[in-house]
Image: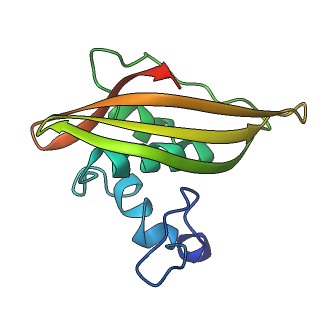
């Protein structure tokens, strides 16, 4: 329960200019995916980042569009996610969106990496799904 009150790994800032707690941010999507889908592509992207931090393969696979979804998903042992920066998000139309972001990670070997990409999302039957991405 204490982890639910900690700042959400995605770094979203609330109206009071403070980081939102996990339970009030991505936690509501990760922990209640069946009943509370992410309302937009940016929220889905942020929740997917949080799922990587928390190693929630179930959520990542469930929010990956079936046309691109891998059969399994593995996590790098000892990797530590260091932060997320959303650079841009754009609704293309009612069912398509793009989110550009950069995420930082430190591998088990201690080397820091930065992943930057423009991710594509599609909305089907009221739910947003990650489709694929271009390197940023």
Q: Residue at x 23, y 54 (%)?
A: 39
The quadrant the N terminus occupies is bottom right
Determine the image quadrant of residue 15: bottom left
- Nearest to the observer: residue 57 or residue 111: 111
Q: Residue at x 50, y 35 (%)?
A: 57
- Nearest to the observer: residue 51 or residue 83: 83
Task: Give x and y (percent) for residue 94.
Answer: 11, 40
- Nearest to the observer: residue 7 or residue 75: 7
Q: Total marks drawn?
A: 0
41 lies left or right of 113: left
68 lies left or right of 13: left
Q: Residue at x 87, y 32 (%)?
A: 111
Task: Give x and y (percent) for residue 70.
Answer: 43, 16
Q: What colouring method underlies this structural image?
A: rainbow
Task: Give x and y (percent) for residue 34.
Answer: 24, 50
Q: Is residue 1 above or below residue 99?
A: below
Residue placed furthest toward the bottom: 16
Q: Residue at x 39, y 38 (%)?
A: 99
Q: Is residue 80 above or below residue 1?
A: above
Residue placed furthest toward the right: 109
Task: Give x and y (percent) for residue 16.
Answer: 46, 85
């Amino acid at each position: 329960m204490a982890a639910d009150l900690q700042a959400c790994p995605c770094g979203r800032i609330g109206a009071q200019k403070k980081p939102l707690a996990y339970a009030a941010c991505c936690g509501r999507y990760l922990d209640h995916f069946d009943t509370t889908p992410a309302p937009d592509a940016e929220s889905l992207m942020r929740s997917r980042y949080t799922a990587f931090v928390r190693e929630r393969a179930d959520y990542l696979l469930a929010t990956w569009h079936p046309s691109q979804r891998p059969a399994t998903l593995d996590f790098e042992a000892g990797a530590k996610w260091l932060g997320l920066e959303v650079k841009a998000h754009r609704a293309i139309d009612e069912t398509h969106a793009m989110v550009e972001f950069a995420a930082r990670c430190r591998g088990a070997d201690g080397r820091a990496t930065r992943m930057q990409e423009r991710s594509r999302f599609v909305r089907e039957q009221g739910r947003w799904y990650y489709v694929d991405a271009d390197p940023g």
